[in-house]
Image (spheres, rainbow, N blue to C red):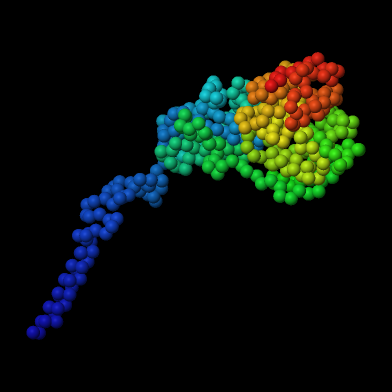
Amino acid sequence: MKNLPQLYSTLLLLLCFNLIACDDEPEANTMAGETEAGEVMAGETEAGEVMAGETEAGEIPIPFDPTSLNGEWDLKIRLVDVGNIEVDFRVTIEASEVFNIDRFDMSVLKDGEVSESIATVNDIEVAENGDFSLDITEAIIPGDFSPTGSNVTVTFTLNSQLGGNSSTSSFCGEVTGEVVSLSLPITMSTFGAIEAGSNPTIPGSCNDEAGPMMLPRIETCPDLSAGMNMLSSGGYERGFEVILPSNYTEEMSWPLITLWHGFGSSPSEIKSYSNLEDYAESEGFIMVVPSSYPDGAVEWDSLAPGDSPDLAFYDDMIRCLSESFSVDSQRIHSTGLSAGGLWTAYLSVFRSDILASSVGMSSGLIPDYPMTSTAIPYLAAWGGEADVAYEQDFHILAQDLIADLSANDHFVMSCNHNLEHVWEAEFTPWVVRFMLDHPKGINELPYAGGLPEGVYPDYCEVVNAE
Protein backbone atom coordinates (compact mmCIF):
# COMPACT_ATOMS: atom_id res chain seq x y z
CA MET A 1 0.00 0.00 0.00
CA LYS A 2 1.39 3.38 -1.03
CA ASN A 3 0.17 5.10 2.22
CA LEU A 4 1.61 2.51 4.64
CA PRO A 5 4.76 4.52 5.60
CA GLN A 6 2.62 7.57 6.32
CA LEU A 7 0.34 5.43 8.53
CA TYR A 8 3.32 4.14 10.48
CA SER A 9 4.53 7.71 11.08
CA THR A 10 1.13 8.76 12.37
CA LEU A 11 0.92 5.81 14.78
CA LEU A 12 4.43 6.60 16.10
CA LEU A 13 3.49 10.21 16.85
CA LEU A 14 0.35 9.13 18.70
CA LEU A 15 2.38 6.70 20.83
CA CYS A 16 4.83 9.47 21.86
CA PHE A 17 1.97 11.78 22.87
CA ASN A 18 0.50 9.04 25.06
CA LEU A 19 3.82 8.41 26.80
CA ILE A 20 4.19 12.11 27.60
CA ALA A 21 0.66 12.23 28.99
CA CYS A 22 1.35 9.16 31.12
CA ASP A 23 4.33 10.92 32.74
CA ASP A 24 1.94 13.61 33.99
CA GLU A 25 -0.26 11.08 35.78
CA PRO A 26 0.62 9.28 39.05
CA GLU A 27 1.40 5.60 38.81
CA ALA A 28 -1.21 3.23 40.13
CA ASN A 29 1.22 1.62 42.60
CA THR A 30 3.05 4.33 44.63
CA MET A 31 6.63 3.95 45.81
CA ALA A 32 7.43 3.79 49.55
CA GLY A 33 7.27 7.28 51.00
CA GLU A 34 4.93 8.53 48.22
CA THR A 35 1.15 8.84 48.10
CA GLU A 36 -1.53 8.30 45.54
CA ALA A 37 -3.04 11.19 43.63
CA GLY A 38 -4.80 13.65 45.90
CA GLU A 39 -2.99 12.52 49.08
CA VAL A 40 -0.37 14.59 50.96
CA MET A 41 3.08 13.07 51.53
CA ALA A 42 4.31 12.77 55.14
CA GLY A 43 6.08 15.97 56.12
CA GLU A 44 4.40 17.91 53.31
CA THR A 45 1.26 20.03 53.10
CA GLU A 46 -1.41 20.42 50.48
CA ALA A 47 -1.16 23.15 47.89
CA GLY A 48 -1.14 26.59 49.43
CA GLU A 49 -0.06 25.39 52.92
CA VAL A 50 3.39 25.95 54.46
CA MET A 51 5.50 23.00 55.62
CA ALA A 52 6.17 22.83 59.39
CA GLY A 53 9.26 24.84 60.23
CA GLU A 54 9.32 26.50 56.80
CA THR A 55 7.76 29.38 54.97
CA GLU A 56 6.80 29.62 51.30
CA ALA A 57 9.62 31.94 50.31
CA GLY A 58 13.06 30.36 50.60
CA GLU A 59 12.11 27.81 53.28
CA ILE A 60 12.91 30.19 56.19
CA PRO A 61 12.12 28.82 59.71
CA ILE A 62 8.88 30.02 61.27
CA PRO A 63 9.67 32.88 63.69
CA PHE A 64 9.93 31.94 67.35
CA ASP A 65 6.85 32.81 69.40
CA PRO A 66 7.92 34.44 72.70
CA THR A 67 4.52 33.62 74.24
CA SER A 68 5.84 30.08 74.68
CA LEU A 69 8.06 31.55 77.42
CA ASN A 70 5.15 32.90 79.45
CA GLY A 71 5.32 31.75 83.07
CA GLU A 72 7.94 31.20 85.79
CA TRP A 73 11.48 29.93 85.32
CA ASP A 74 14.31 28.84 87.62
CA LEU A 75 17.52 30.45 86.38
CA LYS A 76 21.07 29.85 87.63
CA ILE A 77 23.94 32.25 86.96
CA ARG A 78 27.39 30.68 87.24
CA LEU A 79 29.93 33.44 87.85
CA VAL A 80 32.91 31.77 86.21
CA ASP A 81 34.87 35.00 86.72
CA VAL A 82 34.22 34.87 90.48
CA GLY A 83 35.38 31.39 91.44
CA ASN A 84 32.38 29.66 89.78
CA ILE A 85 30.05 30.88 92.52
CA GLU A 86 26.41 30.17 91.61
CA VAL A 87 23.28 32.20 92.36
CA ASP A 88 19.73 31.00 91.63
CA PHE A 89 16.90 33.27 90.49
CA ARG A 90 13.16 33.00 89.92
CA VAL A 91 12.20 34.68 86.65
CA THR A 92 8.70 35.62 85.50
CA ILE A 93 8.22 36.24 81.76
CA GLU A 94 5.22 37.89 80.13
CA ALA A 95 4.99 38.05 76.34
CA SER A 96 2.05 38.76 74.05
CA GLU A 97 3.56 39.39 70.63
CA VAL A 98 5.92 37.75 68.20
CA PHE A 99 9.41 39.33 68.40
CA ASN A 100 8.83 40.87 71.83
CA ILE A 101 8.95 39.97 75.57
CA ASP A 102 6.79 42.49 77.39
CA ARG A 103 8.20 41.91 80.88
CA PHE A 104 11.13 40.00 82.40
CA ASP A 105 11.15 40.08 86.21
CA MET A 106 13.91 38.62 88.44
CA SER A 107 13.94 37.59 92.10
CA VAL A 108 16.55 35.59 94.00
CA LEU A 109 15.86 31.95 94.85
CA LYS A 110 17.48 30.29 97.87
CA ASP A 111 16.49 27.16 99.81
CA GLY A 112 13.02 27.24 98.28
CA GLU A 113 12.41 30.87 99.30
CA VAL A 114 11.97 33.68 96.77
CA SER A 115 13.06 37.26 97.44
CA GLU A 116 11.29 40.44 96.45
CA SER A 117 11.86 41.48 92.85
CA ILE A 118 15.42 42.78 92.32
CA ALA A 119 15.08 43.84 88.66
CA THR A 120 12.45 44.22 85.91
CA VAL A 121 13.14 44.73 82.21
CA ASN A 122 10.39 45.65 79.73
CA ASP A 123 10.05 45.47 75.93
CA ILE A 124 12.82 43.01 75.05
CA GLU A 125 13.25 42.38 71.34
CA VAL A 126 13.36 38.72 70.33
CA ALA A 127 15.07 37.53 67.15
CA GLU A 128 13.30 35.23 64.69
CA ASN A 129 15.24 32.24 66.01
CA GLY A 130 14.33 33.03 69.64
CA ASP A 131 17.59 34.66 70.78
CA PHE A 132 17.29 37.75 72.97
CA SER A 133 19.43 40.01 75.14
CA LEU A 134 18.54 42.07 78.20
CA ASP A 135 20.42 44.47 80.45
CA ILE A 136 20.14 44.63 84.24
CA THR A 137 21.58 48.08 84.89
CA GLU A 138 21.83 47.52 88.65
CA ALA A 139 20.44 44.94 91.04
CA ILE A 140 21.08 44.21 94.71
CA ILE A 141 21.12 40.59 95.80
CA PRO A 142 19.87 40.90 99.41
CA GLY A 143 22.03 39.51 102.19
CA ASP A 144 19.44 36.94 103.26
CA PHE A 145 19.65 35.44 99.77
CA SER A 146 23.29 36.03 98.80
CA PRO A 147 26.03 33.38 99.20
CA THR A 148 28.01 35.68 101.51
CA GLY A 149 25.17 36.77 103.79
CA SER A 150 25.70 40.43 102.78
CA ASN A 151 24.12 42.57 100.08
CA VAL A 152 25.88 42.21 96.73
CA THR A 153 25.38 44.80 94.00
CA VAL A 154 25.62 43.51 90.43
CA THR A 155 25.05 44.67 86.90
CA PHE A 156 24.84 42.23 84.01
CA THR A 157 23.66 41.43 80.52
CA LEU A 158 21.99 38.11 79.73
CA ASN A 159 22.51 36.93 76.16
CA SER A 160 20.01 34.11 75.69
CA GLN A 161 20.22 31.38 73.08
CA LEU A 162 16.95 29.62 72.27
CA GLY A 163 17.68 28.14 68.87
CA GLY A 164 14.15 28.54 67.52
CA ASN A 165 12.58 25.67 69.46
CA SER A 166 8.95 26.77 69.75
CA SER A 167 8.22 24.14 72.40
CA THR A 168 11.27 25.04 74.48
CA SER A 169 11.40 24.01 78.12
CA SER A 170 14.74 25.69 78.76
CA PHE A 171 17.01 28.47 77.60
CA CYS A 172 20.60 29.41 78.35
CA GLY A 173 23.46 31.65 77.34
CA GLU A 174 26.26 33.95 78.42
CA VAL A 175 26.51 36.63 81.11
CA THR A 176 28.63 39.79 81.12
CA GLY A 177 28.69 42.73 83.52
CA GLU A 178 30.24 43.48 86.92
CA VAL A 179 30.07 42.48 90.56
CA VAL A 180 29.97 46.08 91.66
CA SER A 181 30.56 45.33 95.36
CA LEU A 182 33.93 43.74 94.51
CA SER A 183 34.74 45.90 91.45
CA LEU A 184 35.07 42.67 89.46
CA PRO A 185 34.19 42.51 85.76
CA ILE A 186 32.09 39.59 84.49
CA THR A 187 33.37 38.55 81.08
CA MET A 188 32.96 34.79 80.69
CA SER A 189 30.11 33.72 82.95
CA THR A 190 27.08 31.63 81.96
CA PHE A 191 23.47 30.87 82.84
CA GLY A 192 20.78 28.27 82.30
CA ALA A 193 17.02 28.29 82.91
CA ILE A 194 14.33 25.62 83.19
CA GLU A 195 10.61 25.72 83.94
CA ALA A 196 10.11 26.60 87.62
CA GLY A 197 9.97 23.54 89.84
CA SER A 198 10.62 21.08 87.00
CA ASN A 199 13.99 19.90 88.35
CA PRO A 200 15.88 20.60 91.60
CA THR A 201 19.11 20.77 89.58
CA ILE A 202 19.19 23.96 87.54
CA PRO A 203 21.79 24.04 84.75
CA GLY A 204 24.32 26.84 84.97
CA SER A 205 25.24 26.87 81.28
CA CYS A 206 24.28 25.50 77.86
CA ASN A 207 26.59 22.49 78.23
CA ASP A 208 26.16 21.35 81.83
CA GLU A 209 25.84 17.79 80.57
CA ALA A 210 29.63 17.88 80.11
CA GLY A 211 29.96 17.33 83.88
CA PRO A 212 31.99 19.10 86.57
CA MET A 213 35.54 20.35 86.04
CA MET A 214 38.16 17.72 86.84
CA LEU A 215 41.79 18.82 86.63
CA PRO A 216 44.70 16.36 86.48
CA ARG A 217 47.14 16.26 89.40
CA ILE A 218 50.88 16.44 88.98
CA GLU A 219 52.62 13.23 87.91
CA THR A 220 56.21 14.00 88.85
CA CYS A 221 57.19 16.57 91.47
CA PRO A 222 60.16 18.90 90.96
CA ASP A 223 62.81 19.14 93.64
CA LEU A 224 61.83 21.95 96.00
CA SER A 225 64.14 24.04 98.17
CA ALA A 226 64.00 26.84 100.73
CA GLY A 227 63.00 30.13 99.12
CA MET A 228 60.79 30.67 96.05
CA ASN A 229 59.60 27.65 94.11
CA MET A 230 57.46 27.16 90.99
CA LEU A 231 55.07 24.33 90.24
CA SER A 232 53.06 23.55 87.09
CA SER A 233 49.57 22.81 88.38
CA GLY A 234 45.98 23.15 87.17
CA GLY A 235 47.10 24.82 83.94
CA TYR A 236 49.19 27.51 85.65
CA GLU A 237 52.72 28.11 86.82
CA ARG A 238 52.26 28.57 90.57
CA GLY A 239 54.68 30.21 92.94
CA PHE A 240 55.17 29.68 96.67
CA GLU A 241 57.86 30.48 99.21
CA VAL A 242 59.22 27.83 101.57
CA ILE A 243 60.69 29.02 104.87
CA LEU A 244 62.64 26.50 106.95
CA PRO A 245 63.78 26.95 110.56
CA SER A 246 67.54 27.29 110.87
CA ASN A 247 67.79 23.98 112.74
CA TYR A 248 65.85 22.06 110.06
CA THR A 249 67.09 18.52 109.52
CA GLU A 250 65.80 15.56 107.55
CA GLU A 251 66.28 13.33 110.57
CA MET A 252 63.05 14.51 112.20
CA SER A 253 59.51 15.31 111.00
CA TRP A 254 58.29 18.91 111.06
CA PRO A 255 54.88 20.58 111.26
CA LEU A 256 53.82 22.45 108.11
CA ILE A 257 51.77 25.68 108.16
CA THR A 258 50.48 27.34 104.98
CA LEU A 259 49.76 31.10 105.12
CA TRP A 260 47.22 32.50 102.60
CA HIS A 261 47.00 36.20 101.71
CA GLY A 262 43.76 38.13 101.20
CA PHE A 263 41.92 39.75 98.28
CA GLY A 264 44.14 42.35 96.61
CA SER A 265 46.99 41.55 99.00
CA SER A 266 50.25 39.65 98.49
CA PRO A 267 52.49 37.08 100.19
CA SER A 268 54.91 39.81 101.30
CA GLU A 269 52.12 41.83 102.93
CA ILE A 270 50.67 38.98 104.98
CA LYS A 271 54.17 37.89 106.01
CA SER A 272 54.85 41.42 107.20
CA TYR A 273 51.75 42.10 109.29
CA SER A 274 51.36 38.59 110.70
CA ASN A 275 55.05 38.22 111.62
CA LEU A 276 54.51 34.46 111.30
CA GLU A 277 58.00 33.89 109.95
CA ASP A 278 59.57 34.63 113.34
CA TYR A 279 57.52 31.81 114.88
CA ALA A 280 58.59 29.35 112.20
CA GLU A 281 62.05 29.82 113.65
CA SER A 282 61.21 29.93 117.36
CA GLU A 283 58.49 27.24 117.39
CA GLY A 284 60.05 25.01 114.77
CA PHE A 285 57.80 24.48 111.75
CA ILE A 286 57.99 24.68 107.96
CA MET A 287 56.16 27.75 106.69
CA VAL A 288 54.77 28.02 103.14
CA VAL A 289 53.38 31.23 101.61
CA PRO A 290 51.65 30.65 98.22
CA SER A 291 50.76 33.25 95.58
CA SER A 292 47.35 33.35 93.91
CA TYR A 293 47.13 32.66 90.17
CA PRO A 294 46.90 35.64 87.78
CA ASP A 295 43.53 34.76 86.19
CA GLY A 296 41.74 34.40 89.52
CA ALA A 297 39.45 37.42 89.93
CA VAL A 298 39.04 36.56 93.63
CA GLU A 299 42.04 35.11 95.45
CA TRP A 300 41.59 31.39 96.11
CA ASP A 301 38.74 29.28 94.72
CA SER A 302 36.70 29.07 97.92
CA LEU A 303 33.32 30.24 96.63
CA ALA A 304 31.95 27.05 95.08
CA PRO A 305 32.37 23.31 95.61
CA GLY A 306 34.09 21.14 93.04
CA ASP A 307 37.53 20.99 91.52
CA SER A 308 39.44 24.16 90.68
CA PRO A 309 42.96 25.36 89.80
CA ASP A 310 43.55 26.35 93.44
CA LEU A 311 42.40 22.98 94.78
CA ALA A 312 44.65 21.20 92.28
CA PHE A 313 47.49 23.50 93.35
CA TYR A 314 46.93 22.73 97.02
CA ASP A 315 46.93 18.96 96.41
CA ASP A 316 50.03 19.14 94.21
CA MET A 317 51.89 21.52 96.54
CA ILE A 318 51.28 19.41 99.66
CA ARG A 319 52.36 16.25 97.85
CA CYS A 320 55.53 17.84 96.46
CA LEU A 321 56.42 19.50 99.77
CA SER A 322 56.08 16.11 101.46
CA GLU A 323 58.41 14.56 98.90
CA SER A 324 61.09 17.25 99.17
CA PHE A 325 60.98 17.91 102.91
CA SER A 326 60.49 15.92 106.10
CA VAL A 327 56.85 16.91 106.68
CA ASP A 328 54.87 15.37 109.52
CA SER A 329 51.64 14.25 107.83
CA GLN A 330 49.85 14.43 111.19
CA ARG A 331 50.70 18.11 111.65
CA ILE A 332 49.69 19.96 108.46
CA HIS A 333 47.82 23.19 109.21
CA SER A 334 46.35 26.24 107.44
CA THR A 335 45.78 29.90 108.29
CA GLY A 336 44.98 33.12 106.42
CA LEU A 337 43.12 36.43 106.50
CA SER A 338 40.00 37.56 104.57
CA ALA A 339 40.04 35.71 101.23
CA GLY A 340 42.84 33.64 102.76
CA GLY A 341 40.57 33.00 105.76
CA LEU A 342 37.72 31.92 103.47
CA TRP A 343 40.13 29.56 101.73
CA THR A 344 41.33 28.19 105.07
CA ALA A 345 37.74 27.41 106.08
CA TYR A 346 37.15 25.83 102.66
CA LEU A 347 40.22 23.59 102.98
CA SER A 348 39.26 22.68 106.53
CA VAL A 349 36.09 20.97 105.33
CA PHE A 350 37.00 19.99 101.74
CA ARG A 351 40.51 18.76 102.65
CA SER A 352 39.92 17.69 106.24
CA ASP A 353 41.67 14.40 105.40
CA ILE A 354 44.91 16.36 105.00
CA LEU A 355 44.65 19.12 107.60
CA ALA A 356 45.06 18.56 111.34
CA SER A 357 43.70 21.96 112.46
CA SER A 358 43.26 25.51 111.18
CA VAL A 359 42.90 29.15 112.19
CA GLY A 360 40.78 31.39 109.99
CA MET A 361 41.21 35.14 110.47
CA SER A 362 38.03 36.89 109.27
CA SER A 363 36.90 33.69 107.62
CA GLY A 364 33.70 31.96 106.56
CA LEU A 365 32.36 29.10 104.48
CA ILE A 366 30.57 30.14 101.27
CA PRO A 367 29.56 26.72 99.79
CA ASP A 368 27.23 24.41 101.66
CA TYR A 369 28.97 22.27 104.28
CA PRO A 370 30.12 18.97 102.64
CA MET A 371 28.59 16.07 104.53
CA THR A 372 31.61 13.89 103.73
CA SER A 373 33.93 16.13 105.74
CA THR A 374 35.82 14.93 108.82
CA ALA A 375 35.66 17.19 111.89
CA ILE A 376 38.93 18.94 112.76
CA PRO A 377 39.74 21.65 115.37
CA TYR A 378 39.12 25.18 114.08
CA LEU A 379 39.74 28.62 115.58
CA ALA A 380 37.60 31.40 114.09
CA ALA A 381 38.92 34.91 114.75
CA TRP A 382 37.33 38.14 113.50
CA GLY A 383 36.95 41.84 114.26
CA GLY A 384 33.40 42.12 115.55
CA GLU A 385 30.43 43.82 113.91
CA ALA A 386 32.72 46.33 112.17
CA ASP A 387 34.64 43.55 110.41
CA VAL A 388 33.55 44.52 106.89
CA ALA A 389 35.55 44.39 103.65
CA TYR A 390 34.30 44.98 100.09
CA GLU A 391 30.79 45.46 101.49
CA GLN A 392 30.87 41.91 102.89
CA ASP A 393 30.08 41.39 106.57
CA PHE A 394 32.66 39.04 108.07
CA HIS A 395 30.86 39.18 111.43
CA ILE A 396 27.94 37.34 109.79
CA LEU A 397 30.31 35.00 107.94
CA ALA A 398 32.07 34.11 111.21
CA GLN A 399 28.79 33.42 113.03
CA ASP A 400 27.55 31.19 110.20
CA LEU A 401 30.86 29.32 110.02
CA ILE A 402 30.92 28.66 113.77
CA ALA A 403 27.34 27.35 113.59
CA ASP A 404 28.19 25.05 110.66
CA LEU A 405 31.32 23.64 112.27
CA SER A 406 29.68 23.19 115.67
CA ALA A 407 26.70 21.41 114.14
CA ASN A 408 29.10 18.98 112.48
CA ASP A 409 31.09 18.14 115.62
CA HIS A 410 34.24 20.19 115.05
CA PHE A 411 36.09 21.46 118.11
CA VAL A 412 35.58 25.21 117.69
CA MET A 413 37.16 28.21 119.37
CA SER A 414 36.19 31.81 118.72
CA CYS A 415 38.26 34.97 119.21
CA ASN A 416 36.33 38.19 118.56
CA HIS A 417 39.07 40.79 118.86
CA ASN A 418 36.76 43.68 117.80
CA LEU A 419 39.54 45.39 115.83
CA GLU A 420 37.77 45.20 112.46
CA HIS A 421 39.32 43.50 109.41
CA VAL A 422 42.93 43.01 110.48
CA TRP A 423 45.59 40.56 111.61
CA GLU A 424 47.74 42.25 114.21
CA ALA A 425 51.12 40.77 115.08
CA GLU A 426 49.91 40.38 118.69
CA PHE A 427 47.44 37.70 117.51
CA THR A 428 50.12 35.44 116.04
CA PRO A 429 51.34 33.71 119.25
CA TRP A 430 47.91 32.20 119.96
CA VAL A 431 47.28 31.50 116.25
CA VAL A 432 50.42 29.36 116.18
CA ARG A 433 49.77 27.79 119.58
CA PHE A 434 46.30 26.60 118.58
CA MET A 435 47.56 24.80 115.48
CA LEU A 436 50.58 23.20 117.09
CA ASP A 437 48.48 22.05 120.05
CA HIS A 438 46.08 20.18 117.73
CA PRO A 439 47.79 17.49 115.64
CA LYS A 440 45.83 14.62 114.12
CA GLY A 441 45.31 11.41 116.03
CA ILE A 442 45.18 12.76 119.58
CA ASN A 443 42.88 10.80 121.85
CA GLU A 444 41.79 13.76 123.98
CA LEU A 445 41.38 17.38 122.95
CA PRO A 446 43.99 19.43 124.84
CA TYR A 447 41.54 22.25 125.66
CA ALA A 448 38.66 20.08 126.80
CA GLY A 449 39.42 20.99 130.40
CA GLY A 450 39.89 24.71 129.72
CA LEU A 451 42.23 27.06 127.87
CA PRO A 452 45.91 27.18 128.91
CA GLU A 453 46.71 30.18 131.07
CA GLY A 454 48.61 33.12 129.68
CA VAL A 455 48.17 32.15 126.02
CA TYR A 456 44.78 33.36 124.85
CA PRO A 457 43.24 36.81 125.42
CA ASP A 458 39.98 37.18 127.33
CA TYR A 459 37.95 37.47 124.12
CA CYS A 460 38.79 33.88 123.13
CA GLU A 461 36.52 31.04 124.22
CA VAL A 462 35.62 27.46 123.43
CA VAL A 463 32.34 27.31 121.50
CA ASN A 464 32.05 23.61 120.85
CA ALA A 465 34.12 20.94 122.56
CA GLU A 466 32.77 17.87 120.72
- Please indicate, yes or no, whether residue 342 appears anywhere in the rendered image: no
Query: In percent of the image, x 70 and y 31: which residue is there?
Result: 348
The residue lying toward the viewer, choosing from 2 and 298, is 298
Residue shown at the point (54%, 28%) measured from the top left: 89
User: How many discs mark residues in the rendered view?
Assistant: 0
* Residue for point 83% across, 37% down: 254
Left or right: 261 with respect to 367?
A: right
Residue situated furthest left in the rendering: 1
Quadrant location, the N terminus: bottom left
Residue 119 x %, y %: 55, 25
Q: Residue at x 87, y 33 (%)?
A: 284
Name the outermost residue toward the bottom. 2
Position of 5 relative to 196 (above/below): below
Q: Position of residue 392 (x, y in %)?
A: 69, 24
174 left or right of 123 in image: right
The answer to whether any part of residue 284 appears in the image is: yes
220 or 298, which lies in front? 220
Residue found farthest to the front: 443
Which part of the image, by quadrant, shows the C terminus?
top right
Residue 58 image offset from top left, x and y in percent = 39, 51
Q: Is residue 169 above or below residue 13?
A: above
Tell me residue 103's x, y (percent).
48, 28
Left/right placement of residue 255 relative to residue 39 reads: right
Task: Identify the residue at the far top of this view.
Answer: 458
Establish if 31 lies above or below 224.
below
On the rendered structure, is 304 left or right of 237? left
